[in-house]
Amino acid sequence: MTEETGRREPGSPSDGGVSAGLKTPAKRMSNGSIMASCFIFAFGMVGAAYASVPLYRLFCQVTGYNGTTQRVEQYSTRILDQTIRVTFDANTSNGLNWDFRPVDRSIEPRLGETVQISYKATNRSPYEVTGTAVFNVTPMEAGAYFNKVQCFCFTETTLKPGETLDMPVVFFVDPDLATAEETKHIRTITLSYTFYPSTPAAKPVAALPEKNVTDGKKL
């Protein structure tokens, strides 16, 4: 007790430590809330990471970010006299035994001119293989102006043992590339593909050949 007020000071020895003891549950509740918040934040970040993948792909397709080309349904209606040099690059991953290369190493179309080029792929393995191509262009700023009308990269490609396939690409370079501030200095664009092995989709049961067995039933 104090001489002036006659009241006990909280947490003083005469108080028996009761007031101090009352603070412990509050601290525990606070720590529990912090732990719960951390778990919620962690799970939220994981969910955001998965959700960001398709959003990132959509962003790249719309903006041409990271050299992603554009997919269009119609040819260009405006063609300039100015030309652009387009070179072609081909690569395969270590797990794919294919010979993959462009038929022509480079062309010089006019800006806005729709052209067709081809790549060739040969399966050098003794079994059927399905591959998927990923692609980009450099400089990356040109991606938003590189428009594909037709491309083997839109679908999977399956080659039988020893099979060679001619794979066309139809594209044009948007004439706006010549006037945009970030691309008007570009004189050469490189279109690059890399093939990776992929698992072909399973065939439906109805598409499988029917086999006869001794009891007359079908598999």
Image (cartoon, grey):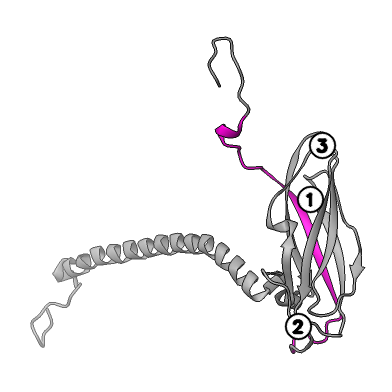
Few, some or many residues within 10 Å of mark 2 (<14, 14–19, 20+) = few
Residue kind at label 3, given as amino acid type: Pro
Q: Quadrant of the N terminus?
A: bottom left
- Mark 1: secondary structure: loop
Residue 52 percent across, percent down from the top left: 54, 65
Chain-order first, disc 2 or disc 1: 2
Q: Is residue 53 left or right of residue 29?
A: right
Q: Which residue is mark 1?
A: 93
Q: Say which label, 3 or 1, has the lower sequence index.
A: 1
**114 within the magenta span:** no
Q: Is residue 202 one of those drawn in magenta?
A: yes
Residue in view at x 57 percent, y 62 percent: 53
Q: Does residue 159 sit above or below 26 in this rendering?
A: above
- Which residues make up the magenta segment? 181-208
Cα gap from disc 3 to disc 1, whole angstroms: 18 Å
- Label 1 amino acid? Ser
Which quadrant of the view contains residue 104? Answer: bottom right
Front residue of 23/90: it is 90
- Judge from the rendering whether residue 25 lies leftward or rightward of residue 71; answer left or right: left
Residue positioned 41% across, 60% down in the render:
39
Q: Which residue is mark 3?
A: 161
- Find out whether the residues at labels 3 and 1 contact each other: C-beta distance under 8 Å: no
Decide if residue 188 is on the left or right side of residue 64.
right
Q: Which residue sits at x=64%, y=76%? A: 63
The reply to whether discs 2 and 1 touch (Cβ–Cβ < 8 Å) is no
* Disc 2 residue type (three-letter): Arg
Instruction: Tell me where residue 28 sits by quadrant.
Output: bottom left
Closer to the N terminus: mark 2 or mark 3? 2
Q: Residue furthest top?
A: 214
Q: Residue 183 in the image: x percent, y percent?
A: 77, 84
Q: Which residue is depicted at the point 73% across and 72% down?
A: 147
